[in-house]
Image (tube, coloured by chain):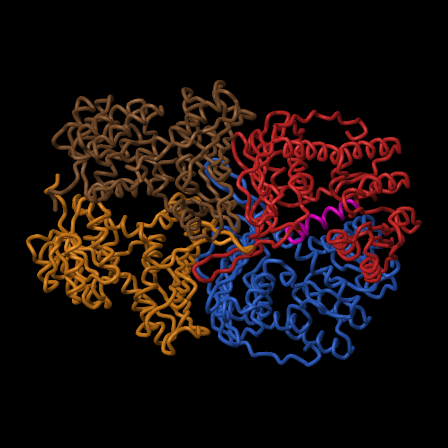
Chain colours: A orange, B blue, C red, D brown
Amino acid sequence: MATELLRVGVIGTGNIGADHVDRVANQVSGARVTALFDVATERAAELAGQVGAVAMPTASEVISSPDVDAIIIASPGEFHAPLTLECIAAGKPVLCEKPLAPTVEECESVIAAEQASGRRLVQVGFMRRNDAGYRHMKNNLSSGAIGEALLLHCEHRNPDVPDSFTSQMSMTDSVIHEIDTARWLLGEEIVRVRVISGKQTPNAAPHLHDPQLVIMESQSGVLVSVEVFVNAKYGYDVRCEVVGSSGVTSLGSQDLGNFVSDTRRTATMPANWRIRFGDAYRAEIQDWINGIAAGQVRGANSFDGLCATHVAQAAVRAVTTGTTVEVPVLEQPAFYH
Amino acid sequence: MATELLRVGVIGTGNIGADHVDRVANQVSGARVTALFDVATERAAELAGQVGAVAMPTASEVISSPDVDAIIIASPGEFHAPLTLECIAAGKPVLCEKPLAPTVEECESVIAAEQASGRRLVQVGFMRRNDAGYRHMKNNLSSGAIGEALLLHCEHRNPDVPDSFTSQMSMTDSVIHEIDTARWLLGEEIVRVRVISGKQTPNAAPHLHDPQLVIMESQSGVLVSVEVFVNAKYGYDVRCEVVGSSGVTSLGSQDLGNFVSDTRRTATMPANWRIRFGDAYRAEIQDWINGIAAGQVRGANSFDGLCATHVAQAAVRAVTTGTTVEVPVLEQPAFYH
Amino acid sequence: MATELLRVGVIGTGNIGADHVDRVANQVSGARVTALFDVATERAAELAGQVGAVAMPTASEVISSPDVDAIIIASPGEFHAPLTLECIAAGKPVLCEKPLAPTVEECESVIAAEQASGRRLVQVGFMRRNDAGYRHMKNNLSSGAIGEALLLHCEHRNPDVPDSFTSQMSMTDSVIHEIDTARWLLGEEIVRVRVISGKQTPNAAPHLHDPQLVIMESQSGVLVSVEVFVNAKYGYDVRCEVVGSSGVTSLGSQDLGNFVSDTRRTATMPANWRIRFGDAYRAEIQDWINGIAAGQVRGANSFDGLCATHVAQAAVRAVTTGTTVEVPVLEQPAFYH
Amino acid sequence: MATELLRVGVIGTGNIGADHVDRVANQVSGARVTALFDVATERAAELAGQVGAVAMPTASEVISSPDVDAIIIASPGEFHAPLTLECIAAGKPVLCEKPLAPTVEECESVIAAEQASGRRLVQVGFMRRNDAGYRHMKNNLSSGAIGEALLLHCEHRNPDVPDSFTSQMSMTDSVIHEIDTARWLLGEEIVRVRVISGKQTPNAAPHLHDPQLVIMESQSGVLVSVEVFVNAKYGYDVRCEVVGSSGVTSLGSQDLGNFVSDTRRTATMPANWRIRFGDAYRAEIQDWINGIAAGQVRGANSFDGLCATHVAQAAVRAVTTGTTVEVPVLEQPAFYH
């Protein structure tokens, strides 16, 4: 069995990439890290030493290495499509962090290449699909227990962002998670999006609209409201509720436990997304590894990645123009059925 | 002291009117019911007998009766303004159920008459201002503990409505509560409103848009999102959250208690608005009575009633036209400062 | 109707007595305060002035006053029985704060006098019977929905007490509420009690055992565990749970609302018993007034008061001796069926 | 790296053993299952086939196999000590499910052998130490934020047990978890235990006392109350609260998510301990594997196992005799410091 361990190469070892290295090396079954790359070469070398991997001088060398069976891409978004194309060319499975690519065109090039290769190789890192809370909601929805879905309410709050963060990035980096969540929970596409900016928090850079309210509609008319607030200060808080025709299902409290003092009953919230979604990321990676062993892509595939970017780009136009933007439904190739 | 009991006449003894009769007669201090009127004369007579009051043949007789010091109007909305005007003419304090009137013009006539009378006589029945939960939110907001208010999220769900209920009535009968709540919590006016209808519940009459999503903006740009869903089936559920620049405050759970069986931890929710807001209504009536003794209007006044109708009418236009409707800010007469 | 207002005299106008004065004068229907007495004569005079009552020089004058129809006793416990006996002698209904008396013998003298008078005149101030949460529990129990009651878990925590408070008073002043709660919820008597003292809080006076754990058993063997902690510092926290053979019912959260900041989701708890049980006290007084009008004692009667003191005294012996104390079941006179 | 995978043998592949096989094979990093044994040979063979291991004809062969580096013992409790002794004799690390042994004598023999071997080889399966909720409590306690611990309240409820389950097994199989939890949270030993049986549930076998209330005391006097109820029917429910001198900390809700219908807000509870503690078990196994790599025993060691059995046996005597049983503090050998 030992020789069958999947040999994983990791490209990009910033926060999330380093977490993925640790997960593959120390938290999941059936894989180990053999190679990694980051432009911060010292950090990459140090990490490589910790997990018995080799730090390589370029991403391409990781992808083409004979010691690498599969690749995780956690580099900045602009490199996602070119690197994913290289993985496809090398015939190796790849887990690409969201977004699959910042532009629809790049996503389409990935889909074209993947189809041409004849094999499903690409998974996109929408880890919420592996979160116990979202799965509980999906089960309540599928069982018919709340009737038909009518509304989806989401809150997505981060404590803060760097000054370089823009109003458009709120769509492409944050709301893109809710876009995938909506598609996955509802089983249909988003067809319309508008973005409303109101009073700005004094804690954001002047160029940034924050918070913003995103109103989307699905094919059957389900309204999806998303509050995105990236300088919420008080903590990391992600909530989701589906309102159905006969009931409601929502994420439970994500609190770590209770603490009472000074006439206040306090629940300790997860401080950031790494804590909140740690279990989901671990399950995602395990699922990806198991899927490779079974010759399957079990998570979000590259068509899901295309659709999410497609809607996120519409949301960017909605931010920029202040109008309601129609989102044509993309036809799903039979390859992804 | 006994002779100082405020003698209250109640006009309209349907559900809420009958509850008010019971409250004045049996649950609050300083008042008794001496006269009442309803078009359902038998019901009125029976109620009158229970509380030692006289059932009168017309509303006007209640208002002009020498045995009546103050009036509660709980008749259908179309009669609110004419009856309130009669009360003002009689120089008697009046608690008028919301809305003050269905049209802005009627509300303005009430304000004109009240100012001409030289005395503040009119209170409007926005009972949420007396609810412990909303007061807790207002305190958290006033204390500065959550920073500046940026967003207000509201859900307003009723189990069901009769077939005669229209999409416009969702604004004038239900959302009008959130309009007053927003004005009262934020301390500023609503200036813009749009209404978005999505997928309709199969449990509503065909002519009714249900649920609807109402997006309003305040003078300083605070976004107010209201889900109104009048055939939610599962129960009566009213929720409210203010998102501030450094924290969040929301209504606590309104659950009556817990019950566990069959691997489900269940909280018993209030079945309807009479249970949910029973305490608030009682406090409102007590406050109204105490205010009369002190020569004050302590709750929502007729200018508040005008503003609520003003915004609700804009929301009705938003429903009808599908557009974003601007709401000019009305100047508050010095009389209501 | 006005002349039918019940004229109430209040004896003892410390914290709870002053609250009762305010409730009768300003918060309930059908009564007014006409006379009051307190050894702190200035305070009594001031209060009397606020509510249009007369401050009398002695308690006995309140009881015998022709302007007083019914009496509330909120004086220190040692005066409860003598004053209650005076009320019975005067043939006037009385609401006596708990305990009915500190000793079983005094309680028995009250019962004897009440029976001899031929009329039920005495109610004891166990206000939890009027609390919405406890009523919800009782309903869940009565409906059979949790099967047979097997265990009752209670926590009773106060922020602090004065130095004069003793380990015995934890039983007679605090746990006596749980004793009545257990009898009322379970519908049977307590027959055995032991008290276990463990590690003492550094925040209590050296002579005081605090916290203490009280374990009682009912006639059918239901175990009742009570944590009593009178220097809990963090707030006033009263909780109760019944474990049944097929489910559990408990008090819901008593929180006033939510507040989030600094990665902590906080619920504001009631700061003290006056806030926590304010609604229950109001309902109790209203119920008492309505009961008098109907010629009934609707709350805890003097036999309930006797039983509670009977068990509390057994608990005091358990504290003092460190042993398990058997509590003989008292026979309920037919007069109290 | 691949050749460094820890080769694990699993003895006993009933419910928990089979779960451990799956965890080692499919959910954790750094190990694989190479051998297993169960008296149910068909089941063992099937499991072995699924994970690429060999089903061996005896437990001893698993322990002595050259293809096995470390052993998990999940056989019935009576075999724990003999098998653990064999592992020690073989010089191989072992994770033994609780209890380390049913008798104090056997536990002592394990400790003696382990010390004689000169190496720490034995970990006992008290997986709650790896549960996020209990860790949150321990952190709140260690930080001093709730002052000194004074009381520990625990509930331990199972849906049901087979008829063969006895009142003593409630101590040795269920309460033993709370015993370890108390020692670990409080950092001191249990010195006194009494068990109180009250009204029995109609859902238990006649020979079984259920529920039972266990009252323990720690060296410094902290009272530990444990309700153990093994036929609670409604679900699996484990709760824990530490009351400190200035605050309280407790496990958060363990609910999977919310679901609302029919005026009931419902939280889905974990149906059984496999779901409730699945994450804790996984973390425990990962920690054990990592500990072996580091030459450490990071979880409960065999002295912890001895102490837990020591107290559980005292609780068994308390059940049998109905008395309060003193528990002498065992001296911790320097080997376990």
Q: Is residue A189 left or right of residue C191?
A: left
Assess whether residue A153 is covered by the magenta stretch: no
Residue placed furthest toward the right? C66
Q: Is residue A163 left or right of residue C84?
A: left
Q: Nearer the viewer, residue C111 or A278?
A: C111
- From which residue to which does the magenta span run? C274-289
Q: Nearer the viewer, residue C185 or B10?
A: C185
Q: Is residue A242 shown above or below D77?
A: below
Residue placed furthest toward the left? A66
Q: Is residue A328 shown above or below C91?
A: below
x, y (%) of residue A233? 42, 66
x, y (%) of residue A148? 43, 50
Q: Is residue C297 shown above or below A272?
A: above
Tell me what residue is drawn at x 80 percent, y 26 percent. Answer: C334
Assess whether residue C279 is covered by the magenta stretch: yes
Q: In which quarter of the image is residue C178?
A: top right
Tell me what residue is drawn at x 15 percent, y 33 percent. Answer: D68
Q: Is residue C285 left or right of residue B102?
A: right
Q: Nearer the viewer, residue D231 or B200?
A: D231
x, y (%) of residue B122? 73, 69
x, y (%) of residue C255? 57, 53
Determine the main secondary structure of the stretch shown in magenta. helix
**Camera sees residue A250:** no
Picture quarter with the C terminus of chain C: top right
Q: Is residue D203 left or right of residue C33?
A: left
